[in-house]
Structure formats: structure tokens, C-alpha cells
């Protein structure tokens, strides 16, 4: 009786399966890249102000307290949709003014509440941070966060 699975057949199955899954992996990678670039990225251009705001976000380690689209810490509120909650998503100047007022009012000093530290940002840095948060708010998050409060 002849063997059903010879060494050459096993080798062919291994190589054929490996090639198949590499092709599937490459196809899924291309699909994901196209999806991210064409569908899920923000509806706003990635301007120099947005980049400046991202640098402020990273330099000050905002993600150590806040979450952005569910990533980060949960000590402070989710800020991925903060501009929508404040009603200034389509108003760059309003976003800057509200963010500036909020930052300048910190820490609030209300007993028993978590306190945001005081920051000394320039208007340019605050404008960049406001633009970064407006940009992040326009990203297609597929329904995240599940409620308006984050």
C-alpha cells in the first residue's frame, strides 16, 4: 500500500499553504492601508497647526491622563470628541477660545475632584492643540466612544 503523504507531497502542501497565507496577508495589508487612507482618516487636512498640536500633546504627555479614541489613560475625560461636545467642531476660533479658557482655569480647585495641572502654553501652542483636537474629532471612529461623554 502506497503512502498517501510522502515527503514531496508534505513539502508541496507546506510551500503551497505558506504562499497562500502570504498572499492573503499582503492583500489584507493593502486593503487596510487603503481603508485607513481613504475612509477612516480625518475629514480635515493635516495642517502644520495640527502637527504642532500633536507635538504639544506628546510633549506634555496628555495621554497619561486623557484617552484619545479609547487609547490612553482613563483618569481624565476622553478628548477624541471634545470639540463636538463643546459645539466648536466647525469653528477653529471658537475651539481655540474655549480651549484657552479651559486651560487657563485649571486647576479648578474644587475639592474632591480630579485636578488638571496648570500649563503655561503660548497662544500658538494652544491654537495647535485646538486644531489637533478638531482634527482628531473628525476621524471616523466607527461609533467610538459609545456615548457623547466619552
Image: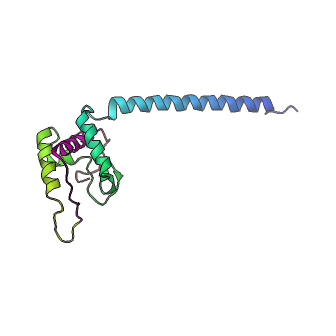
- The answer to whether residue 17 is left or right of residue 122 is right
Range drawn in magenta: 114-139
Q: Nearer the viewer, residue 122 or 91?
A: 122
Q: Most extreme residue toward the bottom, as rendered?
A: 111
Count how many numbered circles sit on residues in the image. 0
Q: Does 6 sit left or right of 63 as displayed?
A: right
Q: Position of residue 100 (x, y in %)?
A: 14, 49
Figure check: 108 above or below 42: below
Q: Say whether residue 91 is visible.
A: no
Q: Residue at x 13, y 49 (%)?
A: 98
Q: Position of residue 64 (x, y in %)?
A: 33, 56
Residue 126 in magenta stretch: yes
Residue 35 sits in quarter = top left
Q: Tell me where residue 92 appears, x and y as whole percent.
A: 14, 39
Q: Is residue 74 magenta?
A: no
Relative to 148, say whether 19 is above or below. Answer: above
Q: Out of 118 and 18, give the one closest to the viewer.
A: 118
Amino acid at each position: 500500500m502506497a503512502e498517501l503523504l510522502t515527503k514531496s507531497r508534505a513539502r508541496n502542501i507546506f510551500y503551497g499553504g505558506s504562499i497562500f497565507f502570504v498572499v492573503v496577508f499582503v492583500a489584507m495589508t493593502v486593503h487596510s492601508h487603503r481603508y485607513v487612507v481613504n475612509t477612516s482618516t480625518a475629514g480635515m487636512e493635516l495642517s502644520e497647526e495640527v502637527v504642532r498640536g500633536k507635538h504639544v500633546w506628546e510633549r506634555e504627555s496628555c495621554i497619561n491622563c486623557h484617552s484619545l479614541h479609547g487609547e490612553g489613560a482613563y483618569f481624565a475625560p476622553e478628548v477624541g470628541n471634545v470639540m463636538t461636545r463643546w459645539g466648536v467642531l466647525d469653528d477653529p476660533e471658537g475651539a481655540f477660545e474655549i480651549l484657552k479658557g479651559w486651560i487657563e482655569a485649571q486647576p479648578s480647585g474644587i475639592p474632591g475632584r480630579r485636578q488638571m495641572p496648570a500649563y503655561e502654553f503660548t497662544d500658538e501652542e494652544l491654537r495647535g492643540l485646538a486644531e489637533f483636537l478638531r482634527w482628531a474629532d473628525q476621524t471616523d471612529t466607527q461609533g467610538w466612544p459609545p456615548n457623547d461623554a466619552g
